[in-house]
Image (cartoon, rainbow, N blue to C red):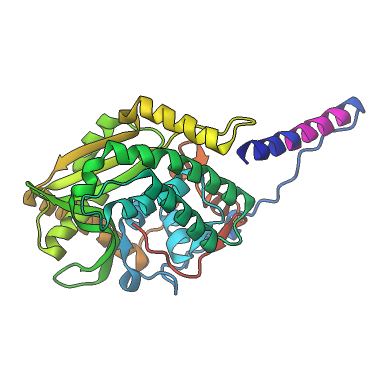
Amino acid sequence: MVIRRRAIEVSESDRLKSSIAQRKASGKAVKKPSVKRKSIAELPWSDPAIRRSSDYWDFNRDGLSWSGMDKFATCREQFRLHYVEGWRKVAEDLPLTFGDAAHWFLAKFNVDVNGVAMSEKKIDELLKLYDAEWRRDNAVASPTAAETHEHVLALCSAIWKEYALWWPEDRAKKWKEVEDYWEMQYPVESPRTILKGYCDGAYYDDEGLWLYETKTKGNVDEWLIQDSLVVDTQTQLYMWRFWKQVGELPTGVQYNIVRRPAHRLKQNESLRSFVDRVRGEIRKDPEKYFLRITHHTSEEALQRFETEQLSQRVAEIEWWSKGGPHYINSTRLVDYGKRVDTFDVITKGDVSGLHRAETRKKEK
């Protein structure tokens, strides 16, 4: 499916080039397509009375997830469009789709396991179940979204069978939580909002309680991740939550990284051959695809996190929600060489490619 889509894109590009060449050959002027751009006064962020809350999101009522705090720190207008106005991408891209699939599979891997090994037959059954659930929930998916799903399904068929072989000890862990949603009032003493998120997992070993956080990445910088965990907002928040809400001080976090294979379906290659090829590459160097980093914490470190990060971030967003300074961070409209989801609505007032979510999806 990927190859067919690429062929269509190339053929459309070739037709455009051919048309331009024909116009040049005939001596006719080549006109650039005109784009009607809105004036600054017409753009959605130019109104000084822009909404800071809505039926979709309100600071006191709906609260904050880690991803919400991260989005606010990145760009206040991106935060407003995403949370207050509810704008979302119509079709998710490969990294997001693969990440969602990874969390779905790991929840199945790590719950009710009782030390029983995960067989390839069981993984094939999970693949069929995941596919059925995706098709049920995306009955009107676009061709691009359906194509991405097929690609992700093939990658999952290769990667999770090797993952189960590489980390068999997970099946014997004493899990406390697996993909559990949590929320708590904050500040604890005089609540004004809610903190919330999804915990990928938490388990006990001889050292105590460990937070288990999974990330899927295309590129992995082991040393950068290791050095960053000491100030990582998400893992610090989740460990702090165990301490304050659950009443257990975690020993630390085990950061579970799954590298997303970059392989693509070759021309005339069957899906079965593609899966076998990807699995073969993973088997050659599993440490490249499966990595775990352990970081210890302490009561002092988590108290410092609350004082220096969490309370400050929450207070800043609360101030903003009541009319505090609002601006666009123009340096963060392009991320890893790609326009952010709301780039066109911020720069041109163009919401094509986006839709307004009707209900809020629970998020990390």
Q: Which is nearer the eye, 120 or 199?
A: 120
Where's residue 23, x and y in %?
87, 31
Asked if the stretch drawn in magenta spans residue 15, the answer is: yes
**In terms of image quadrants, where is residue 22?**
top right
Where's residue 301, x and y in %?
11, 48
Q: Could you tell whether 89 is left or right of 235 in the image?
A: right
In the depicted structure, whether residue 38 falls above or below residue 187: above
**In terms of image quadrants, where is residue 61?**
bottom left
Asked if the stretch drawn in magenta spans residue 346, the answer is: no
Where's residue 228, x and y in %?
24, 38
Pick the quarter of the image with the N terminus: top right
Q: Residue visible at 91% across and 28% down?
A: 27
Q: Could you tell whether 165 is left or right of 114 in the image?
A: right
Q: Could you tell whether 143 is left or right of 127 in the image?
A: right
Where's residue 206, x and y in %?
7, 47
Q: Residue visible at 60% across and 48% down?
A: 144
Numbered-mark total: 0
What secondary structure prevails in the magenta region? helix
Pick the quarter of the image with the C terminus: bottom left
In the depicted structure, whether residue 28 falls above or below residue 303: above
In the depicted structure, whether residue 84 falls above or below residue 277: below
Q: Could you tell whether 300 is left or right of 11 in the image?
A: left
Q: Is residue 237 visible?
A: no
Q: Residue visible at 43% across and 28% down?
A: 280
Q: Is residue 286 visible?
A: yes
Q: Residue visible at 53% across and 37% down?
A: 272
Q: Residue furthest right?
A: 26
The magenta-colored residue range is 12-23
Q: Which is nearer the eye, 333 or 104?
A: 104
